[in-house]
Amino acid sequence: MSLPMSCPVCGGSVFALGAEVFDDRYGEPNRYQLACCNSCGHVATEPRFHEADLPRLYGTYYPRKKIRAFDVTAQAAEVRSSFASLKRWWNGTNNQGQYTVRSGEIMLDVGCGSGVSLLEAKALGATAFGIEADPNVKPIAAALGLKIHFGSLQDKPFPDQSFDLIVMNQVIEHLPDPDLTLQTLRERLMPNGRMVLVFPNTASLWRRLSGSRWINWHIPYHLHHFDRKSFTRMAKHCGLEVVRSRTITPNVWTLLQLRANRYQPQRGQPSPIWMVANRSESAPVTARKFGPLRGLIRVGALSLFAVFNRIVDLFGMGDSLLVELRRSEQ
C-alpha cells in the first residue's frame, strides 16, 4: 500500500493532511486521511493503494459475493422496458455511460462490476467488453458468457480491439493513477470515439451539507475526489476535452445519505445501512423489503427526493458528474 503522494491534476507533490476517515460501509479496519494538494486543491485519500492491492481489497470487503447471475440478467432486462429512459431520469439512475451507447458500436466498460452494463449494452445493439478487478464476479461472467478481463487496464486486455465508446461508471475515483488511465484509454479509442465517465462530485450540495459524513468519500475505495474543474484540468493534460457534462443524483443516494447522517459508524465494523442497500449492486431500497406501511413511506420519500434532486441537478450541484470526453484537437 501507500504510493508516493502525487497529484494527477497538476503534478504537485505537497499535500496537506486533513480529516481522519475510515471505511464506514464494509468494515475495512485501517485509518486514512483526506489530503489536499497545496498547488491546485485536489483531494486524495492517504495512504493510497497500489493497483496490485485492489483485487484483495475488493475481494475481501466489497459486497458482490452474494450476487447471482439471475439477478444480473433480471436487472439488465429492464433497459428495454416501457418508459425505461423516463424511469431512469426520474430515479436518477441514468448516471451510467452504457445508456449512451448506439446500436452497432463496440463498447468497453472499465470496472464493469457484475457485468449488468455489458448485458444492457448488448440489449441496445452494441458489442460489449469489460475489465474488472473484483474476483467475486468471475462466476457471473462464466455463467453469462460475458467478455470480461479480470485484472487491470495495465494488462493490455483485448489488444487488437479499439472502441467506439469507453465507459467508466463510478470507477475513475477508485484508481491510484487516474491520469495514466485516461492516457491509456485515449489510445484505445477509434478515431471518432468517445469516453463517458461518471464519478462523485465534490462540489455537490449533499457534500457541502454532510461534510465528512458524505457517503461518496467512500474510504478507502475512493482514492481521488474530483469536481468539474479538477477533472477537466486533468483530462486536458491527458489529451482529452470535456465536450459536455451534467450532474445526476440517484434518489436512493439521498435516502442513504440521510440515514448515514444519523448513524454512527464503528471502524472495522460493517454498517447495517450498507448491508441492506447492497443486497443488489444497484442498491434499490424497495417497498417489499420493509412491509406495506414502511414501504409506502419510503416510496413517498423517494418521490420527494426525485423532485428535489432533479432541481439540484439542473443547477449542476448533484452528487455525481457525467462527462463525455473526446480526443482534443492538438
Image (cartoon, rainbow, N blue to C red):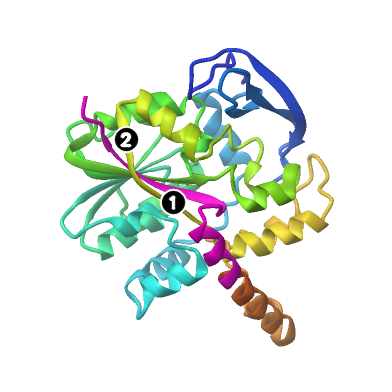
Q: Quadrant of residue 69?
A: bottom left
Furthest residue toward front:
315
Left or right of 260? Residue 71 is: left
Report the quarter where the N terminus lies: top right
Q: Secondary structure at mark 1?
A: helix
Name the residue rendered at 17%, 33% in the picture. Answer: 160
Task: Give percent across and percent down for residue 61.
Answer: 64, 43
Q: Is residue 93 left or right of residue 129?
A: right
Say if residue 204 shows up in the picture. Answer: yes
Kind of residue sitting beneath label 2: Glu
In this view, the residue in front, 309 or 254, is 309
Q: Quadrant of the C terminus?
A: top left
Write the residue at 31% across / 54% down.
145
Question: Which circle marks residue 139 in the picture?
Answer: 1
Q: Which residue is mark 2?
A: 241
The percent position of residue 59, horizontal first and vertical second, equals: 57, 40
Instruction: Name the residue nearer the viewer: 273 or 234.
Output: 234
Which stretch appears magenta?
307-330
Mark 2 crowd level (few <14, some 14–19, many ≥20, 10 Å Cα): some
Q: Residues within 10 Å of mark 1 (few under 14, many from 20)?
A: some
Q: Is residue 80 magenta?
A: no
Q: What is the x, y in percent for residue 18?
A: 74, 27
Callout in the foreground (1, 2)? 2
Of the residues under marks 1 and 2, which one precedes in the sequence?
1
Q: Looking at the image, which residue is at 18% across and 60% down?
A: 103
Q: Name the image quarter holding residue 274.
A: bottom right
Residue 37's tag is none
Q: Residue at horizontal 54%, vertical 16%?
A: 6
